[in-house]
Image: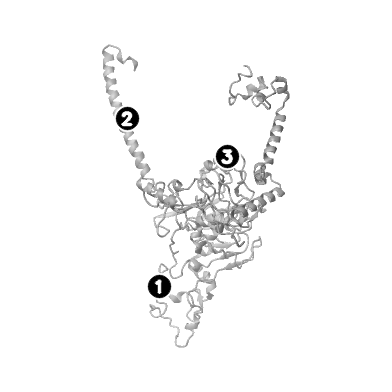
Amino acid sequence: MTDDTKPGPAGSEGAEHLALSKTGALAPLLLLAGITLFAVLGFIENQPPYLPVEGVLAAVPHSPSEFPALFDKDDSLLGLDGGGTDGGMVAVAGPPFSRNIFPCMDCHGEADLPPNPVRRELVDKHAAIKLINHDEEHRWCLDCHDLKDRDSLHLAGGELVPFTESYRLCGQCHGPQYKDWKIGIHGKRTGYWNGAKRYLLCVNCHNPHNPHFAPLKPLPPPVRPHFLRAIDRPEVKPPVLLPDGGPSTPLGTGVEPAAEPEKKKEESHDK
Amino acid sequence: MTSNGHPLPVLGASKHSCSSEPKNEVEEFPADPDNSPEQEVEARSRREFLANMGLAAAGVLAGCSEEQREEFLRKKFTELKPAEVAERIARLTAEVQKKWNKTATISSAGPMEGVLFGYGLDLSRCIGCRRCEYACVKENNQSRDPQSHWIRVLEMEKGRGVDLEMGNPYYDPALVPDPDHFYVPVACQQCSHSPCTRVCPVGATWMEPDGIVVIDYDWCIGCRSCMASCPYGARHFNWAEPNVPAEELNTNMHVLGNRPRPKGVVEKCTFCIQRTREGRYPACVEICPVGARKFGNLLDPESEISKIIKQKRVFVLKSGLRTEPKFYYFYGL
């Protein structure tokens, strides 16, 4: 395109073309740049996880010590006889009875409370127990609980099963889950991976009258990277010995907790 | 080219300069200012120079405290003799005593014979309650502020499937599981072909015979190459001195695991090496309220994890990278 200044019929035509294309090329370029800029800005704004413009700010660090009920007890090895390749003992947790409800025959064994095998809505006692999401259309109490021996459950064939072996009853219908539970795929196990373990009964996690696993409140989210405190401050105070020579004072964090995150919180809101 | 007018050393040009002017190497580092004659310079060997440096270093070190000297002269963990491991444990125990006024039990238990650890996570069970994240923090003495979480639970849209780039670790609904989402907890995948151990320039991270990828926190130089190479974001850097309050310190430690880490090193999940080498389940397995987390010996055909691999639909994250993780996700349903 160096010969556009040359005179001549073809040249003048070319020059005209060039002038057109110069202005013509700039406009779409600018347009394109504008569109790209908007697209990029829009894309950044619509990234849900990385900007706290929507949803959770996640600015304050939380520690497991805030949830003592969850993390302070460590009884997973209680009653287990240790690890080892021999398999060890297997302990199964007890059934989660309500307080003062077992043995059932304390009440059901009394003479003025004869067994009533007729399917009905319970109104006086146990009225609060409603089957939810467990084939309530077809099932009722005595399909699992035994009519005569209320301290036991019974299988479909009539065999009595204690509450501590209720998994056999559940396994009648939930075969795949029962199979998986027996080999440790379904359900929780604690203890030793190479030895003694504690299993949970089905009913420890699934309320037999409402078996869907109950939703939980999640623990707080982790801190977003831009709220992470990454500068050095006095971290853990050195232990201070008490004058009476007793145990040293617990070590504080040496940091005023929410001072900095609060400040950053405001900044991010401004954005 | 005179020796005085020698240009600045150029990368890749050393071969040439060495062969034509062997004296340059010495002249660049004059050992003594009054040794101007060239013959004398030539007579000084590199070995002698280094020996002098060594003496000087020893002199400097003599003025240091015991700990500083130990820190300077320490060796790689993989090269330590048993007695030296015991020395290191003694030093770490003393450090814990000094900083937290607590007595730590630091184990150096080695891998068990015939054991290769594997982990299973049931995605159809996980409800995203984040219990594992915090149990891990407590068990492994991770910094509370600045916060360090080795486990990240990613919330994903049900319609999208496992899409790590769109995973949101900051979800916070009132109750989980959210009906429109599922959850994928991600920590170190303990790869068999681990990119992190390959890129480490100083050999401070390696895979143990039982499959756990560990870090020598005394040897790590904090270059973060491993973090850049990890496709799972599983490695975490201590930007500041880790902060663990004394009353929350877990004193059951392993020298390659949850021992206190200094500022400026990279740290990661070790399958709770301090627990699993004693035969116990990792902390995240024990806390999981839905029993979604499974752990065991891949070489034992009767173990839970072996049965899962045989019987369930198992996959690993980013399998196309051929990192061969030993962390298997599966659908129990």
Circle 2 chain: A
Q: Are marks 2 and 3 on the same chain?
A: no
The quarter of the rendered structure image containing the N terminus of chain A is top left
The answer to whether residue B168 is visible is: no
Same chain? Circles 1 and 3: no
In the rendered structure, which disc, 2 or 1, sits on the residue that comes first in sequence? 2
Q: Give the Cα separation between the discs numbered 2 and 3.
A: 43 Å
Could you classify mark 3 by the number of other residues whose Cα lies within 10 Å: few (under 14), some (14-19), or many (20 or more)? some
Q: What's the residue at 54%, 71% (across, down)?
A: A94
Q: Residues within 10 Å of mark 2 (few under 14, many from 20)?
A: few
Secondary structure beneath label 1: loop
Residue B244's quadrant in the figure?
bottom right
Task: Look at the numbered discs 2 and 1 and tell me whether their residues touch, using CB distance below 8 Å.
Answer: no
Q: Which mark is residue B216?
A: none
Q: x, y (%) of residue B190?
A: 57, 48
Closer to the observer: label 1 or label 3? 3
The residue wearing badge 3 is B199
Spatial separation of the CA atoms under disc 2 and disc 1: 69 Å
- Frontmost residue, B212 versus B75: B75
Image coordinates of residue B71 in percent, x first then y, are 64, 44
User: Tag 1: residue type?
Assistant: Lys
Q: Which residue is mark 1?
A: A130
Q: Which residue is mark 2?
A: A29
Colour scheme of the picture:
one colour
In the displayed structure image, the side of residue B126 where residue B212 appears, left or right: right
Q: Amino acid at mark 3?
A: Val
Q: Position of residue B118 (x, y in %)?
A: 58, 53
